[in-house]
Image: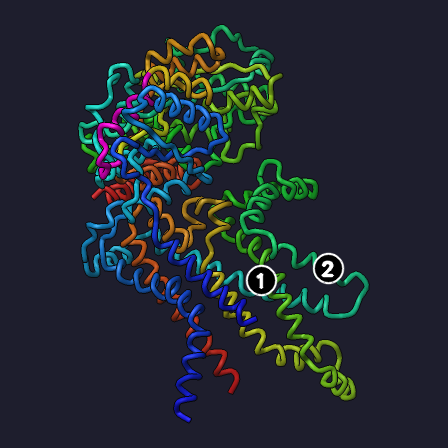
């Protein structure tokens, strides 16, 4: 028994010492680059990344080599970010790592990541939304390796049955404005007596920022001012009020709902759903019998300018790395047309560069092509701000509050309040 | 003689050391660090540039409407959940205290929610309470009651969370009450029977007073656990609608790890820690006064 206790105590001490020693992710070899990614090895994305790294090691044999480490994230990416934060505190960041679009500004501002302008050879080929997302303070800090987008998915049969001629539906070149879209909703609600569209209003997370901010940009408004220092005077101006009124009308008139039925579009209960490229994959694998099409974002009647959401995970270089050349070469390699095409096709996501659009155009579904076209022409990155988490959460709360139309009739008052809340974070 | 004492205490401390080291490393040290960070502007991504800012964080807390709202919410939660949860725990314990057929089944059934993870419970209730096609609303509709927006109405959400939390936690307190009930000697009941007491009198004059030490323990543990409410609102409502289910711990978590303001979040933990300390102190004072 005594021996057993000693054993326990000893193993405990060993545990502590090994836990504290901490390994440095970056090796001592000058030409060996370490890379952390947030996906798991088993996913399509992970497999494609592994293939790209293998090709890199082959092509640069004798010059550079790269190691990839998969750090699967849990839920909304918290697990991976915790690991990055911990590595930052203990100074054990890898040379290259992935980060989500909205983190660019905070990481750049804190001096965690280095500008990579000089290492990226195909900057002109990358989509404007990718450059916008990765640029902070005039310098390019990160390059997204794919894109994302949202559109109005509609059930062809249900629309036909409601007497709608599918050939009159909007396209990316000729989008509908909010009023036209609401007329369609009216017809559908009258026919089916259910909400016409599931806009994901039950999701109180980043979705509300990501999917609803393009309405504001289409109207000509914005969330914060140009230099990212103030929201009052911007987020509570007339354009914001009009946008929020549109969203509130959608709920108040019963065109959409705060509490949609689970999978209502996929199972043919609601005729339309506001969702992104990931649903294309879901429809293909789980609901192959549903015939559906995709419409572009409805636009503001004042401008008729189509704006759509965008954003994705990106590659960036750690600011503390002493292997800038090798790390830069790796990022450039991973964002070349060939590598981007590989990841786009494997993971069924939207392409991040013009040349990749050409490569994949004929290999993906017509629905995917609508989103690709919309994204290439009209993708808008989320604001690049160090205080993004607070700004985004306040925006989400605003959308959520607006949907409670009985309690928030006075939209101006709500926006004044929320703009002040953002100002507090931006100071 | 003295020698033996010294050797004995060395032995004693070495036996205590694993626990002490763990306690120091994972409890005491973080507490001290949090107090220190509370006076700095620690930003998660720039750990080396933190600066001493004095009471700035604490002044900001007093003016933070969301934090104040979260305190109000958790106070309401505690006030509602304690009687509901402890009351139902006592009721369940009384029910299964008697020898009956199938007692074991009920014991397991009442205890089962405690074993399940809180996240699982929350997701489960999220489905049951769905306003459009959740089971509960379907039943309500059959009975002729309009579907209720349990979790999507700012006026109902916190009470829904009270109910779910009490449902989940009551099984645990039930077991403790059961142990307390079984510690009451049957001779006391026999004596009262001789005096002609009925069941209700038995309960009021014997069961309750003799359960008092157990009840105090349960009160304090439930109170502290209730203050730490985070998982249910995190999964079921994300603090909404309109911050009506935002709790201090959830807000601290959000501020610290998504907004990355560790300094400010630490200051809130210090304030909140002191508040819990005061409440617990008052509670133990009150229950001790009752004793004398």
Of labels 2 and 1, earlier in sequence is 1
Question: Depth check: A143 or B93 in front?
Answer: A143
On screen, residue A335 versus residue B120, left or right, reads left
The answer to whether residue A404 is visible is: no
Specify the quadrant of the image occupied by residue A283.
top right
Labels 2 and 1 share a subunit: yes
* Mark carried by residue A11: none
Of circles 2 and 1, the one toward us is 2
Height in image: B33 above or below B194?
above
Specify the quadrant of the image occupied by residue A238.
top left
- Determine the residue positioned at 24% across, 46% down: B46
Q: Position of residue B160 (x, y in %)?
A: 54, 51
CB contact under 8 Å: marks 2 and 1: no
Height in image: A120 above or below B8?
above
The answer to whether residue A211 is visible is: yes
Question: Depth check: A179 or A355 in front?
Answer: A355
- The residue stretch that appears in magenta: A318-336
Q: Secondary structure at mark 1?
A: helix
Task: Give the residue at mark 1.
Answer: B84
Q: Position of residue A34 (x, y in %)?
A: 33, 34
- Determine the residue positioned at 62% across, 54% down: B113
Q: Colour scheme used in the picture?
A: rainbow
Residue placed furthest toward the front: A62
Q: How many marks?
A: 2
* Mark carried by residue B106: 2
Height in image: A5 above or below B151?
below
Q: CA distance from mark 2 to mark 1?
A: 20 Å
Q: Secondary structure at mark 2?
A: helix
């Amino acid at each position: 028994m005594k021996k057993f206790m000693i054993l326990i105590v000893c193993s405990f001490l060993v545990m502590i010492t090994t836990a504290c020693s901490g390994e440095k992710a970056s090796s001592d070899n000058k030409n060996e680059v370490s890379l952390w990614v947030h996906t798991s090895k088993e996913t399509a994305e992970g497999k494609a990344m592994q293939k790209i790294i293998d090709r890199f090691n082959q092509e640069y044999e004798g010059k550079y080599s790269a190691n990839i480490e998969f750090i699967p994230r849990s839920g909304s990416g918290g697990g991976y970010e915790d690991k990055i934060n911990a590595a930052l505190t203990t100074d054990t960041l890898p040379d290259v790592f992935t980060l989500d679009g909205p983190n660019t500004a905070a990481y750049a501002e804190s001096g965690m990541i280095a500008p990579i302008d000089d290492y990226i050879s195909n900057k002109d080929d990358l989509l404007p939304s990718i450059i916008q997302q990765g640029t902070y303070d005039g310098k390019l800090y990160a390059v997204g390796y794919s894109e994302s987008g949202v559109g109005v998915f509609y059930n062809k049969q249900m629309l036909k049955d409601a007497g709608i001629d599918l050939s009159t539906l909007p396209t990316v070149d000729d989008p509908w404005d909010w009023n036209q879209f609401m007329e369609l909703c009216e017809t559908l609600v009258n026919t089916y007596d259910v909400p016409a569209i599931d806009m994901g209003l039950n999701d109180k997370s980043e979705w509300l920022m990501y999917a609803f901010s393009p309405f504001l940009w289409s109207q000509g408004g914005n969330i914060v001012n140009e230099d990212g220092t103030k929201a009052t005077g911007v987020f509570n101006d007339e354009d914001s009020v009009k946008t929020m009124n549109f969203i509130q009308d959608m709920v108040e008139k019963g065109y959409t709902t705060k509490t949609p039925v689970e999978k209502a579009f996929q199972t043919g209960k609601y005729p339309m759903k506001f969702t992104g490229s990931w649903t294309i994959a879901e429809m293909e694998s789980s609901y192959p019998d549903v015939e559906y099409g995709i419409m572009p974002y409805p636009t503001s009647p004042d401008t008729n300018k189509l704006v759509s959401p965008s954003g994705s995970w990106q590659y960036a270089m750690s600011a503390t790395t002493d292997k800038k050349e090798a790390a830069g070469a790796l990022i450039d390699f991973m964002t070349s047309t060939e590598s981007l095409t590989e990841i786009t096709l494997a993971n069924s996501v939207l392409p991040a560069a013009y040349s990749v659009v050409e490569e994949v155009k004929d290999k993906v579904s017509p629905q995917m092509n609508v989103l690709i076209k919309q994204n290439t022409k009209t993708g808008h990155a989320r604001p690049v701000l160090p205080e993004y988490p607070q700004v985004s959460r306040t925006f989400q709360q605003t959308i959520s509050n607006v949907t409670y139309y009985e309690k928030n009739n006075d939209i101006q008052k709500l926006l004044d309040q929320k703009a002040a809340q953002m100002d507090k974070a931006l100071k | 003689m003295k020698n033996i004492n010294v050797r004995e205490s060395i032995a004693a401390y070495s036996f205590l050391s694993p626990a002490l080291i763990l306690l120091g490393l994972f409890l005491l040290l973080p507490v001290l660090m949090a107090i220190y960070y509370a006076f700095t502007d620690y930003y998660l991504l720039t750990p080396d540039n933190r600066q001493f800012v004095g009471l700035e964080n604490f002044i900001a807390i007093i003016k933070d409407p969301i934090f104040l709202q979260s305190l109000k919410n958790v106070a309401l939660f505690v006030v509602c959940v304690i009687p509901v949860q402890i009351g139902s725990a006592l009721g369940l314990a009384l029910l299964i205290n008697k020898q009956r057929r199938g007692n074991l089944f009920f014991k397991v059934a009442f205890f089962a929610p405690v074993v399940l993870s809180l996240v699982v419970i929350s997701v489960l209730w999220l489905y049951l309470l769905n306003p459009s096609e959740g089971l509960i609303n379907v039943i309500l509709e059959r009975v002729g009651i309009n579907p209720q927006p349990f979790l999507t109405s700012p006026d109902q959400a916190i009470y829904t969370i009270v109910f779910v939390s009490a449902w989940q936690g009551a099984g645990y307190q039930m077991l403790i009450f059961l142990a307390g009930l079984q510690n009451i000697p049957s001779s006391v009941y026999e004596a009262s029977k001789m005096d002609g007491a009925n069941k209700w009198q038995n309960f009021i004059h014997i069961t309750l007073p003799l359960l008092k030490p157990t009840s105090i323990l349960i009160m304090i543990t439930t109170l502290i656990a209730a203050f730490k409410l985070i998982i249910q609102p995190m999964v079921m409502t994300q603090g909404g609608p309109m911050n009506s289910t935002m709790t201090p711990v959830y807000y601290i978590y959000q501020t610290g790890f998504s907004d990355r303001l560790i300094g400010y979040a630490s200051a809130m933990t210090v304030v909140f820690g002191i508040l819990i300390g005061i409440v617990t102190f008052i509670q133990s004072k009150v229950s001790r006064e009752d004793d004398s």
